[in-house]
């Protein structure tokens, strides 16, 4: 970890003068909205640059350098190489108060971009031994740019802030490469929430299926806990013309896959919580007339409670091993395999306290309570340590059918840049309002 204390003068181009803010407490949210509008184009420019130069998890060297340089230019204490490539900026307000953390994730995905935008990524990298395109196909480039803008606005309000703001720019949210640590879990382990100790943390995600200008949220479990798994089925090879000489791992794997589907339909109380068991990859054999010795399967498990997770883990191990045993084969279950995120849980008290702030930032009719999602977020590691609130902002063009919007993690993934200002406005207001409440 490297720590840099800069003596660079705070940039004052967007500074809110002390007298103005103190004299206009009743309408400071309008002042914040104005500052958000003023910085919007700069945020869009940052996002386009980062989008055009994406980096995979634990490899966000260029992105981290851009972030660190910006925070240093604002006069912050900046820590780099936290959790490998993570960056932390500390802004000490002029008045005593709580420590509020804001988090943005920085990593891109091994996806080859197919969007028509002029700043589309042409970057290639090696992932899992194969060359692939690299793309910000989930919106992390937006998260970084928004938080850079929020940092600039809050720096301009430094003298009036009743506490400290910790800006956390996190690598590897999508998971560290196999064999490496990374993401929020590693940043927590390396003290991201300490020195100074964080009281609460806020984070956001832009969503391509939510209309611009809108915010969605949910108290309690918002995103599922997730674990990946690997199941290796070991059998006995034979000529494909003499299957009776084999212990067929392909047939056994097919039976395991079908049997795993009964976990959700017969074991999970789906009236209480959703859950998912998915096999996403299966590899075995290399020729039509040879029954191979083994098959490997990769999959994911999504749950919205710890008890459901324990149940499903137990049933997967039981079904895989006993099905294989019934066929004379052996199944080795690695669960979790390479990553495991807990449920992203929005603190109930904090969510209720800050809901009026979200409504003020986006308009009451634009803040929408939504069901829990089976997607996952490693913001959960931060929210397991301190009270957290995580919410979504819209990136879908107004009037467009969300069903026609390309899903996240796909080559056609697209976001309407006019939605960024909602995120800027919400994050700044959350900091100021929380500090005002806790003074």
Image (tube, grey):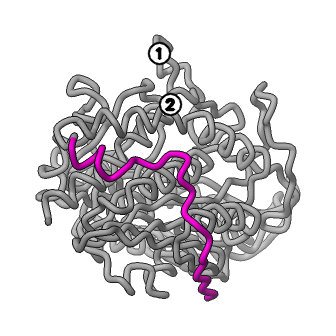
Is residue 376 highlighted in magenta? no
**How many numbered discs, if any?**
2
- Placement of the C terminus among the 4 image quadrants: bottom left
Residue 157 lies left or right of residue 88; in this view the side is left
Name the foreground residue: 435 vs 323: 435
Query: Image check: 79 left or right of 284?
Result: left
For the record, the magenta segment spans 1-23
- 405 lies above or below 3: above
Residue 362 lies, with reference to residue 397, above or below; the image says below
Q: Residue furthest top?
A: 399
Q: Give percent across and percent down for residue 265.
A: 29, 47
- Residue assigned mark 1: 398
Q: Residue at x 69, y 31 (%)?
A: 412
Q: Residues within 10 Å of mark 1 (few under 14, many from 20)?
A: some
Q: Position of residue 303 (x, y in %)?
A: 33, 58
Residue 331 in view here = no
The residue identified by callout 2 is 395
Quarter the N terminus occupies: bottom right
420, above or below 236, in the image: above
Residue 51: x and y in percent read: 72, 45
Disc 1 is placed on an element classified as loop
Q: Secondary structure at mark 2?
A: strand
Q: Nearer the viewer, residue 432 or 184?
A: 432
Q: In the image, residue 11 lies at what x, y percent?
A: 57, 57
Residue at the image position 36 percent from the left and 83 percent from the top: 196
């Amino acid at each position: 970890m490297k720590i840099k204390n800069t003596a660079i003068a705070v940039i004052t181009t967007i500074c809110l003068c002390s007298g103005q803010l103190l004299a206009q407490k009743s309408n400071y949210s309008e002042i914040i909205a104005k500052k958000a509008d003023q910085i919007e184009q700069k945020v869009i420019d940052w996002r386009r640059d980062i989008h055009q130069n994406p980096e995979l998890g634990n490899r966000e060297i260029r992105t981290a350098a851009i972030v660190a340089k910006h925070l240093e230019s604002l006069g912050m204490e900046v820590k780099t190489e936290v959790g490998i490539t993570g960056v932390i900026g500390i802004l000490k307000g002029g008045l005593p108060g709580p420590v509020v953390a804001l988090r943005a994730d920085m990593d891109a995905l091994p996806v080859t971009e197919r969007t028509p935008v002029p700043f589309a990524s042409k970057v290639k990298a090696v992932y899992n031994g194969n060359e692939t395109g690299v793309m910000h196909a989930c919106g992390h480039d937006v998260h970084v740019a928004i938080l850079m803008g929020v940092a600039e606005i809050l720096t301009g309000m430094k003298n009036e802030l009743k506490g400290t703001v910790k800006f956390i720019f996190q690598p590897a949210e999508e998971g560290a490469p196999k064999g490496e640590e990374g993401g929020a879990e590693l940043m927590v382990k390396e003290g991201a929430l300490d020195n100074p100790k964080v009281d609460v943390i806020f984070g956001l995600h832009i969503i391509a299926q939510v209309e611009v200008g809108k915010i969605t949220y949910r108290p309690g479990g918002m995103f599922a806990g997730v674990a990946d798994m690997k199941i290796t089925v070991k059998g006995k090879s034979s000529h494909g013309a003499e299957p009776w000489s084999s212990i067929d791992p392909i047939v056994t794997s097919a039976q395991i896959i079908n049997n795993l589907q009964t976990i959700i339909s017969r074991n999970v109380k789906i009236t209480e919580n959703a859950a998912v068991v998915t096999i996403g990859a299966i590899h075995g054999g290399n020729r039509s007339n040879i029954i191979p010795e083994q098959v490997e399967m990769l999959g994911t498990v999504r749950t919205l409670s710890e008890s459901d997770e324990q149940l499903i883990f137990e049933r997967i191990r039981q079904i895989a091993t006993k099905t294989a045993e019934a066929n004379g084969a052996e199944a080795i279950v690695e669960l979790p395999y390479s990553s495991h995120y807990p449920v992203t849980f929005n603190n109930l008290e904090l969510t209720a306290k800050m809901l009026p702030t979200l409504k003020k930032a986006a308009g009451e009719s634009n803040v929408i309570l939504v069901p829990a999602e089976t997607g996952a977020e490693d913001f959960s590691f931060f929210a397991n340590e301190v009270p957290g609130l995580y919410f979504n902002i819209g990136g879908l063009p107004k009037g467009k059918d969300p069903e026609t919007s390309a899903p996240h993690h796909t080559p056609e993934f697209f976001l309407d840049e006019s939605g960024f200002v909602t995120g800027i406005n919400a994050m700044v207001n959350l900091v100021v309002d929380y500090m005002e409440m806790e003074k």
